[in-house]
Every structure is written in structure tokens, then in C-alpha cells.
Image: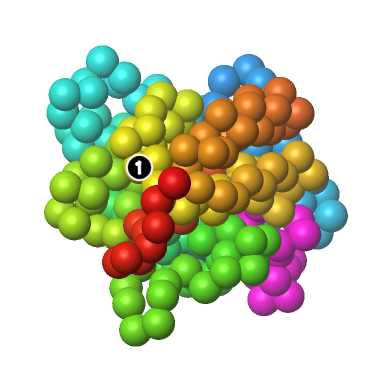
Amino acid sequence: MTHVHVVGLGMGPQHLTVEGAAALRAADYVLAARKGDVDELLEVRRAVCADHGVTLVEVADPERDRDQAADYPAAVRDWHAARVAAYAAELGARGGTAAFLVWGDPSLYDSTLRVLEQVADRVPLTWDVVPGISAPQVLAARHRVVLHEVGQPVHLTTARRLPEALACGQRNVLVMLGSEGSLGALEALADWSIWWGANLGAAGERLVAGRVSEVLGEVRTARAAARAAAGWVMDAYLLRAPSAGEAVA
């Protein structure tokens, strides 16, 4: 029976918890997907493994069909199926105790747990989860804000589905998985407030806050700078509508 520790990594070694470090030390190896010839995020995982004396095993990450944009769920299902096959082959051959290092926390916009459920249909497998520090947590800490107003909810979604959330009347929205193109949707929210961050917790972290109409250009500039500094960019932001009766310039 193979066992897997799914360990939340936050944004790197500085976020690895004591519990996560113990799980890594108990593993025989760490499985990690390699995305292309140059994969900066894989190198972060490699450094973490070296720090904790565990072997990193690379698995070529299957390509996702970007031409299936019209049917995003189908494209993701196909991609997950290919990942299942790749991980099942590696885990079945190696056995023992493995670990996966998941960016942020495994409960938020990550496929590892869904993939492992399917791997278990092919390989005798058990797994546990060690929580990590999520992007929303770091975003709130950096900006020193509470993610919701008193007695009110916060809606968590992706940048791709932000227009849908706004159309449904959401007025306090935490957005993840942003992109440069998705920032255009913010132009219609000129009087909203935004608390934005890229590569949160990493060396090239960038932060911007203010009224959307006043800081959107700064967000775009900071996002490009974060990518240039690190070779990659992950951003998240909180959007909040003005309170009733609040003056709009």
C-alpha cells in the first residue's frame, strides 16, 4: 500500500509549517510535475526537498488543450485524466511513502486531491493532507485587512468567473488565478476598492491598494514587474463595492 502526504507549501519554504516539514521528512520521495524546460516553481520545490533531505522525482506534466476554451471543464477533465495516468504509473512503480508539495493550500484551486482520488482506482493508495498558508490569508495579512465587512460574506472565485459573480450581485469578492487579460473587467468598477498582491510571500512580492480608478494602472505595472523579477506571477485581490451613501469622486 502506497501512502501519500499532500503538503500545503504556501508560497515557498518560508511558509512550510512544522507539520508539513515533518511530513516531508517522513516521505521516501516527493513527486512534482515539470512544466516545460524552464520551471521556476519546480526549482522552489527542489530547494525545499534539498533542505529536508528528500528526493525529488520529476513527472512531465501533460499539456492541457488550450484550444478547448469553449469547454473549459472538458479540457480540465482530459488534463486531469492524463495526470492520473502519469502519477499512477510512478506511484505504482515506486510504492513506499510519497509526498506532493502543493502551492498555497490544497483546498483552494488545486487539483491534487481530485487527481489522487482517481489514482486510488488504479493503485492501492492512502493519503492525508497537511494544510498550507493560502493566498487569501497572505493577502489579508499584507494589507492588514479583514476579508469581509462586519456580519457580511466574502465571495471567493477566479478571475475567469468574476463577471459572473458581479452579475449575481456580489459586492465583496476575493479573486484568485488572475491574468493580465482579466484586469480589463475591473475598468467597470472604477469606484470600488481593491487590495491586490502578486507572488505573495515570495521575494518579488508586489502590493497595491486603493480605488480601482486610481490604481489599476499601477496594478498592471506591478504585475509585469513581479513576472520580470521571478519569471512567473500569481496574483490575488479583494474587491469591495462602495458602501451605500459613500461619496464617489
- In this view, the residue in front, 167 or 91, is 167
Please state the horizontal and vertical placement of residue 119, each as a whole percent of the image: 34, 51
Residue positioned 56% across, 50% down in the render: 210
Residue positioned 23% across, 51% down in the render: 165
Residue 19 falls within the magenta-colored stretch: yes
Q: In this picture, is 96 found above or below 74?
A: below
Q: In this picture, is 157 found above or below 188?
A: below
**Part of the protein shown in magenta:** 9-27
Label 1: which residue? 189
Please state the horizontal and vertical placement of residue 188, each as a whole percent of the image: 32, 36
Residue 192 falls within the magenta-colored stretch: no
Residue positioned 63% across, 27% down in the render: 221
Residue situated furthest bottom in the rendering: 151
> Position of 68 compared to 117: left or right?
left
To which quarter of the image does residue 32 belong?
Answer: top right
Residue positioned 22% across, 21% down in the render: 68
Q: Is residue 111 visible?
A: no
> Position of 151 compared to 14: left or right?
left
| Quarter of the rendering occupied by the N terminus | bottom left
Secondary structure under badge 1?
Answer: helix
> Position of 216 compared to 190: left or right?
right
Q: Is residue 71 visible?
A: yes
Please state the horizontal and vertical placement of residue 73, each as a whole percent of the image: 20, 37
Q: In this picture, is 37 found above or below 170?
A: above
- In this view, the residue in front, 71 or 121, is 71
Q: How many dots with numbers?
A: 1
- In this view, the residue in front, 137 or 72, is 137
Count residues near mark 1 (Cα–Cα under 10 Å), then give few for <14, some for 14-19, many for 20+. some
Q: In this picture, is 190 found above or below 14?
A: above
| Type of the residue with mark 1 | Leu
- In this view, the residue in front, 130 or 153, is 153
